[in-house]
Amino acid sequence: MRISYAKPELAYDIRICLTSVMKRGRKPTIDAADITRAAIAIADAEGLAAVSMARVAAEMGNATMALYRHVKSKDELLALMWDSAMEQPPPLPDGDWRDQLGFWAKAVLTAIRRRPWFLQIPISGPPAGPKNLAWLDSALSALEGLPLEPGEKIGVVMGLSTFVQGEARLNFTLAKGFEEDPARFNHQYGQMLREVVDPRRMPSLAKVVDAGVFDMDDVLDVEDIGADFDFGLHLFLEGVAAHIRGRS
C-alpha cells in the first residue's frame, strides 16, 4: 500500500481537515480530524499495524461506514496521519544557514523519534499537508539569500530530509533488532567478521575489521548513534557549502 499526494482532491481534503475550516451549519458528530487523532492514538499505543478503519471506528464508538463519509479510504487516513504526526516546526535560531539547517534536521529527527511509526507509512508523492509544507518552508527559509537556484534549494532540503529519515529508520531498525537479540550487537560481531571477511575479496572492509572498529562490548550505543548522525549531518552541510563556494 502506497500513498500518493498526486490526487488534487486528496490534497484538498487534507487542507480542509487539518486547518479546521468549518462549513456552515451544524458541526458533524465526527470529522476527519477526529478520526485522524483517534488513529494516531492507536498507532502511538500499539504501532501502525494496529490501525484500521474498523479499529478506529470501534475506538470512537461509531460504525465503520460512518468513517467513510469523512475519510474515503485507509490510504487517505494514513496520509492524514502522516501530516498530523508532526508538530509545527519550531522557530529557527539566529545564526547562519548551517546552524539553522542543522537545527531543523535535529528537530525533524526528534519529531520522528517521538513517533517512529511515522517512518512505516509508505509515501509516493511530495508533501501536500499543511504541517509538512510548514516544515518545508522552514528549511527553505534557512537558505534565503544564498546563491542557489530555487530548484537547488528544494534539492538541498529533500536531500537533507532523506538523510534524516534514513538515519532515523536505521536507528529504529537496529534498536528493534537489539531488543530481539542483543548478542548480535556485542564483540561477537567483530569476531564473526574476522571469520567471514576474506581480505583478498574484501580488502577495504578487512582493514576496518582489523583496525578493531567492531571490537567493543556493545556495537549499538546510543551516544555513538548521536555522533554518527552529527558526523553525517556535518558532511552533508559541508557538501552544500562546497557547492556554494564553487559558485563564487
Image (cartoon, rainbow, N blue to C red):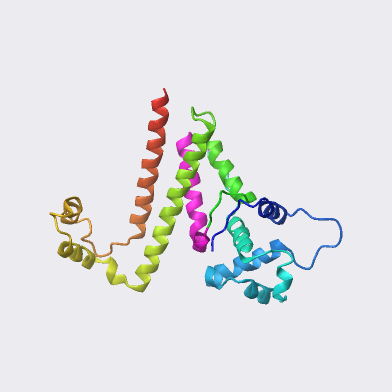
| Left or right of 172, for residue 150 | right
Q: Is residue 7 left or right of residue 123?
A: right
Residue 96: image location, x then y, percent: 48, 33
Specify the quadrant that holds the N terminus. Answer: bottom right
| Quadrant in the rendering for residue 222 | bottom left
Residue 1 falls left or right of residue 205: right
Name the main secondary structure of what is drawn in magenta. helix
Is 51 in front, or is 106?
Answer: 51
Q: Judge whether residue 108 is colored magenta.
A: yes
Residue 128 in the image: above or below residue 93: below
Residue 190 placed where, x, y %? 20, 63
Q: Is residue 92 visible?
A: no
Residue at 56% across / 44% down in the picture? 136
Q: Where residue 69 sits: x, y (%)?
A: 74, 66
Q: Residue at x 45, y 44 (%)?
A: 159
Q: Position of residue 135 (x, y in %)?
A: 57, 46
Q: Residue furthest left?
A: 200
Q: Which range is magenta?
A: 94-122
Q: Is residue 203 magenta?
A: no
Q: Residue furthest right?
A: 25
- Within the image, what quadrant is residue 92 found in? top right
Which of the image's four quarters has the C terminus?
A: top left
Q: Is residue 9 visible?
A: yes
Q: Residue at x 63, y 59 (%)?
A: 80
